[in-house]
Amino acid sequence: MLDFFLKYKMQFLRGTLTTLEISLVGTIIGLLIGLAVGIVRTIPMPKKGLPRIIKKCADGILVAYITFFRGTPMMVQSMLLFYGLKEKFNIDMAPMAAAFFIVTINTGAYLSEVVRGGISSIDKGQFEAAKALGMNHFSTMIYVVLPQALRNILPATGNEFVINVKDTSVLNVIGVTELYFSTKSIAGSTFRFAETFMITCLIYLFLTMIISFVLHRVEKSMDGPKHFRLPGSNQMQV
């Protein structure tokens, strides 16, 4: 199996790099979308007038977006967006552009709910204190809430990254040369399915283990030191 891997290592490597590229970019941009959607959805509902109507319309659109992309498989979304848009609207997307778009909006839908939950986990007294200081909703989010919420949502965001690494395999249906597509091509040309897919399993396992380890270290670094000294005090606090 080692000899087989060395013989086709460049194809495995290209597929692995494509998988990582799509997963990483999709997760980062998806997190930004999730943050934007989460902030908008947590805006207090105006009591009356046009602002109330606009807020209700925005909430309705965002809920529809989240429901659709969380409630349908990524493979079906890929087929619909890549082939459906070309058939009905003559929009011919490159496979890689379609892959980035699909993973990004799919991740954004999942992480928007994660962000909303992270924001809701922050004590309400902090919102009230920020309002008492004259801060509006967006200032409160940026300077008070999100720095705390990001730590709370980091494990779920990392989990979504790991899921994206594995779920990019469905993008082979639109011709994206990611790891699974490369594996299928090698297996189809050599008829050595056991060795080919065992190597791919090990690559996926290695990627997910490395990502999980790095994210765990990042979480630990965000926790800060266990022992610290208050200004003007000689005693260590725990």
Image (tube, rainbow, N blue to C red):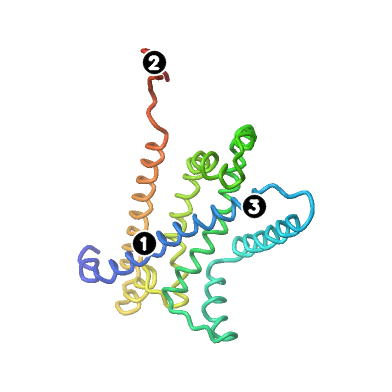
What's the CA distance linking mark 3 and mark 1? Answer: 31 Å
Taking depth in this image into account, of 235 and 71 the one nearest to the observer is 235
The crowding category of the residue bearing disc 2, from other C-alpha atoms within 10 Å (few below 14, some 14 to 19, many at least 20), is few
Label 3 neighbour load within 10 Å: few <14, some 14-19, many 20+: many
Element under disc 1:
helix
Image quarter hosting the C terminus: top left
* Amino acid under disc 3: Arg
Q: Name the one closer to the observer, 54 or 116.
A: 54
Residue 212 is situated, as x and y percent measured from the top left of the image, at: 39, 47
User: Mark 3–mark 1 contact, CB under 8 Å?
Assistant: no
Vertical side of 149 occupied by 51: above or below: below
Q: Nearer the viewer, mark 2 or mark 3?
A: 2
Q: Where is residue 83 in the image (x, y as percent from the top left)?
A: 53, 81
Mark 2 and mark 1 in contact? Answer it, CB < 8 Å: no
Q: Which residue was labeled with disc 3?
A: 41
The dot on residue 20 is 1
Instruction: Give 29 or 214, whichever is nearer the viewer.
Output: 29
* Left or right position of 170 against 178: right
In this rendering, position of residue 172 left or right of residue 48: left
> Label 2's element?
loop
- How many dots with numbers? 3
Residue 231: image x %, image y %?
A: 39, 19
Earlier sequence position, callout 2 versus callout 3: 3
Vertical arrangement, residue 20 with respect to residue 235, above or below: below
Spatial CA distance of label 2 from label 3 is: 42 Å
Q: Which mark is residue 232?
A: 2
Quadrant assignment for the N terminus: bottom left
